[in-house]
Image: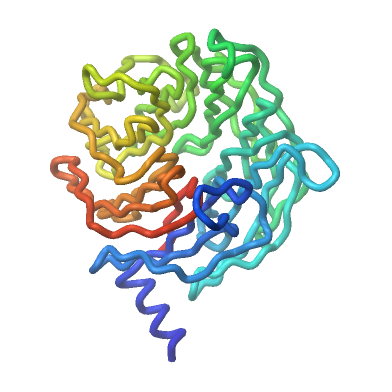
Amino acid sequence: MSQIKEMHMSQSDSFTVYIGTYTSESRLSRRAEGIYRFSLDTRTAALTLQDVTAGIANPTWLTLSPDGRALYAGSEVRKHGRRSGGAAVAYARDPLTGALTRINDALTLGAGPCHLSLDPTGRLLMVANYVSGSLTVFPVRADGGLEPAAQLIQHAGSGPVADRQEGPHAHCVVPDPTGCFALAADLGIDRVLVYRTNVAERRLEAAEPPGISLQPGAGPRHIAFHPTGRWVYVTGELNSTLAVCAWDAERGRLELVQVIGTLPEGWQGTNYPAEVAVTPSGRFVYMSNRGHDSIAIFAVDETTGMLTPAGHEPTQGNFPRHFALDPTAGFLLVANQNSDNVVVFRVDDQTGRLTPTGQTAIVPMPVCVRFAR
């Protein structure tokens, strides 16, 4: 009876929320234990802890398969077992509760895997290894498990910020909406690289041209596509900017059309932009400022994709590493890494405004938020 009730709640009144964490660090009396699973009640906006999946070091980035049957986590470590590099870990999701069961793991052959994504078919898992500045491609088995790495792509180059751009630092890799291409932001070399996705050959192939350069010292971190697939938004972690690029989905080409600041005019201080997301309506772009500790809100021009500042909302915590919109875009959850809390906001899609609900959850060192129905 309780299982039937939980299934009904998950389908009609709540979402499952997974929180990735750093388990190797702590700012509270306790360390994070792994991947935290919450339910978000859409009537009250309350987050309720369901369980924690332990046995994984630093599951900082999470991604779900297109069919929702599997979840993948990056184990962001410099060494895994006796060999250098991190790992990607595959979990099966219980269709009723959302509970996770480990399937297997595979070495990324690179250090510090900080971002994972799947192509739209769910057959290729792509990983960005920050420390080593490389990308790894894994074939996905029919059961959701991972085969050994099929490809390792090593980036090369450097940038003008000596302590952060001494070499390449791949920070994310995401598929375009067509699934024909994948874009990788490399913080260390100030480039967004474009690859063709070859699912049959289980590999990525450099496009021509191979991408674009952003402002020197920008430090591109994360990428979000507009729902129309016409524009791409890229955070500049090192110079507090948001770049707007036009996207040619037929040729796989980017064109820089705007660079806009992410901070209020006159604000002085250290700041590192992190996550970026576009509302399903395509009307607003949100971006997190770590330092200013806010979500920057931008209105989107529906003709050009260019942005106009529409305000900043304090995140009710420190160092907002990541945030996510729920599938209906009614709520936005912010993971404040350095204050160990996840905060729930309501979203007004008419104005872009974010309103704190007063609901929070304590999670040690939260890094990534993922919704599932």
Picture coordinates of residue 190, whole percent (x, y): 52, 15
Picture coordinates of residue 104, whole percent (x, y): 73, 58
Give the mark count.
Answer: 0
Picture coordinates of residue 154, whole percent (x, y): 71, 24
Q: Give the quadrant of the C terminus.
A: bottom left
Position of residue 36 relative to residue 172, above or below, is: below
Q: How is the image coloured?
A: rainbow
Picture coordinates of residue 226, whole percent (x, y): 34, 34
Position of residue 269 relative to residue 352, above or below, is: above
Q: Residue at x 64, y 40 (%)?
A: 199
Q: Residue at x 55, y 71 (%)?
A: 94
Q: Give the quadrant of the N terminus.
A: bottom left
Q: Residue at x 42, y 64 (%)?
A: 16
- Of residues 279 and 161, the one nearer the viewer is 161
Which residue, as the protein is rendered here, is positioned at the far bottom? 1
Can you tell which quarter of the image residue 225 is in?
top left
Can you tell which quarter of the image residue 296 is in?
top left
- Of residues 83 and 27, the one nearer the viewer is 27
- Of residues 318 and 66, the one nearer the viewer is 318
Tell me if 45 is positioned left or right of 111 in this view.
left
Tell me if 248 is positioned left or right of 157 in this view.
left
Q: Residue at x 55, y 70 (%)?
A: 99
**In this view of the protein, can residue 176 be seen by the observer?**
yes
Which residue, as the protein is rendered here, is positioned at the far right? 82
**In this view of the protein, can residue 245 be seen by the observer?**
no
Which residue, as the protein is rendered here, is positioned at the far left? 350
